Image (tube, helix red, strand yellow):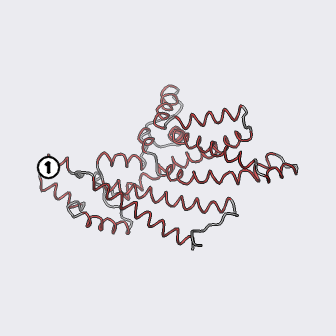
Amino acid sequence: MYIIKRIFTMLVTLWVITTLTFLIMNSIPGDPFASDADVLPEEVVQNMRAKFNLDEPLPVQYALYMKNIMMLDLGPSIQSKTRDVNTLIADGFPASALLGLQSLVIALVFGLFLGTVAALNRNGFIDYAAMGFAIIGISIPSFILAPLLIKYFAVEWGLLPVASWGTWMHTVLPSIALATAPLAIIARFMRSSMLEVMNQNYIKTADAKGLSTTGIVVRHGLRNALIPVISFIGPLIAFLLTGTFVIEKIFSIPGIGKYFVDSIFNRDYPVILGTTIFFSTILIITLFLVDISYRIVDPRIKLSSRGD
């Protein structure tokens, strides 16, 4: 029953997001062909508007768009003459997903490690160093960190390539730039959570029984300390997998973020709507999986909704 209710809620949420995005896009004055009206004959412009149903009343445009959405058709791109929105997303998602997965692994591995080590060495040098790094990581925006990485690792030292996409070496710098802030946030979450868990009575009992610190941390501490971190990981996964606009633009990565930024400048409504729906779908699904993962991490947690 819980899963059925969640699926229904997910569908309603996606419908609300789609509707609001559609209304916002159509509330902007003008249309994608406004700039062409001065250089093309009026008949040509009208035909172009008719091709994309922009000459129809807004309720008709909405009905046609929702009909196509239910058929998993995100429509044609206004700017691209050879690819529709589905094709653009299919072409851009692999690059964004690869970059996102690498960034996620970096953020999780180093974030959980730093947070745990800092908690186990509370108020010591390691704790201060780890949290100092976390503060710096959170404070420096990715659009500032990315050029710094390019300047030193690519331009001055020549260690890694940039401004192209092909081998794993091209993914290192953008992955680091994308992962630094999430890594720092996860480290701070993990430290706070681990400190709270390590002060619980069952941890003190395990220590009194003579279990090693490593055994206590692995068997009892990590599992319970991960629960608050998982709440942050859900939106983070969707954010990383669908690509970040600034990082992809800086490193010239052919991902979804690049198409989204270009579509805004070109007022390519179908691409803006399609990428927004795609991002929202991944976010909604990951949040659902996060709720399921609570049960996996801690079997004592029961999945239920109000009234169950």
Residue that badge 1 annotates: 40
For the residue marked with disc 1, what is the amino acid?
Leu
Q: Nearer the viewer, residue 282 or 11?
A: 11
Residue at left offset 56%, top offset 70%: 3
On the image, the x and y values in percent for residue 101 come to 55, 49
The answer to whether residue 261 is left or right of residue 112 is left
The image quadrant where one finds the N terminus is: bottom right
Task: Name which quarter of the figure residue 275 lies in.
Answer: bottom left
Residue at left offset 57%, top offset 33%: 136
Q: How many marks?
A: 1
The image quadrant where one finds the C terminus is: bottom right
Q: Nearer the viewer, residue 15 or 264?
A: 15
Residue at left offset 37%, top offset 65%: 69
Task: Name which quarter of the figure residue 302 lies in.
Answer: bottom right
On the image, the x and y values in percent for residue 18 come to 38, 61
On the image, the x and y values in percent for residue 34 come to 20, 49
- Is 85 above or below relative to 303? above
The answer to whether residue 52 is left or right of residue 167 is left
- Is 7 above or below relative to 133? below
- At label 1, counting other C-alpha atoms closer than 10 Å, the crowd grade (few under 14, some 14-19, many 20 or more) is few
Q: Nearer the viewer, residue 203 or 285?
A: 203
The answer to whether residue 130 is left or right of residue 283 is right
Q: In what element is the residue under mark 1?
A: loop
Furthest toward the front, the residue is 307
On the image, the x and y values in percent for residue 221 come to 74, 50
Furthest toward the top, the residue is 156
Q: Nearer the viewer, residue 37 or 79?
A: 37
Furthest toward the bottom, the residue is 1
